[in-house]
Image (cartoon, grey):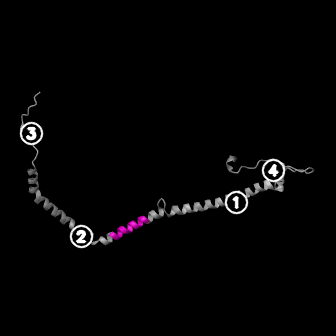
Amino acid sequence: MDFRIRDFSRIRRFPSPQDGVRAVAERAPQAEALAVSWAESVRPLAERIYALRRRIATVTVAVLAGLLFVHVMFGANGMVVYKQKRAEYESLQKRIALEQQENEIYAQKIHGLKTDEKAIEKEAREQLRYARPGEYVYVPPAPANPPPPANHSAKK
């Protein structure tokens, strides 16, 4: 294998810093002309935006206020969700009050069964069908026909 270089013209040399400065200096008038033409084409738009700056700011603030209103009303923790949660809270409070009343009734019954002999006798007569000597307990006969089903799906 031969690794000798025969044609030196193909080898690229790195440009010197002076070459870069020279290239910038040569193209400076073209860049300046391009910047001036761009500034002239953008100037009417910039003047129009500057003239309408208050209207643009007002519209921007109005849009932001509208978006904030929508978020407050309908967002994840908005007023609509708050009203639903409030209604659910109130219904649960009513249910708790009913359950507490029911617990009070049961507590009174338990206390009566522990202390009052008349309450004990009443429960024994009703649930266990106890009777005093000489008394008769009347038990109604069971119904002959079973009651119809609660829903109509069993009639098919």
Write down the residue under mark 3. Answer: 10
Q: For the magenta stretch, what is the residue range? A: 57-68
- Distance between the alpha carbons at the discs numbered 2 and 1: 76 Å
Secondary structure under badge 3?
Answer: helix
Amino acid carrying label 1: it is Gln
80 left or right of 26 in image: right
Amino acid carrying label 2: it is Glu
* Mark closer to the chain start, 4 or 1: 1
Amino acid carrying label 3: it is Arg
Q: Nearer the viewer, mark 3 or mark 1?
A: 1
Amino acid carrying label 4: it is Gln
Q: Answer whether labels 2 and 1 touch (C-beta < 8 Å).
A: no
- Distance between the alpha carbons at the discs numbered 3 and 4: 115 Å
Secondary structure under badge 4?
Answer: helix
Q: Answer few, some or many: residues within 10 Å of disc 3's Cα (few below 14, many 20 plus, some between 14 and 19).
A: few
Write down the residue under mark 2. Answer: 47
Write down the residue under mark 1. Answer: 101
Q: Nearer the viewer, mark 4 or mark 1?
A: 1
- Residue 134 in percent (x, y) is at 93, 50
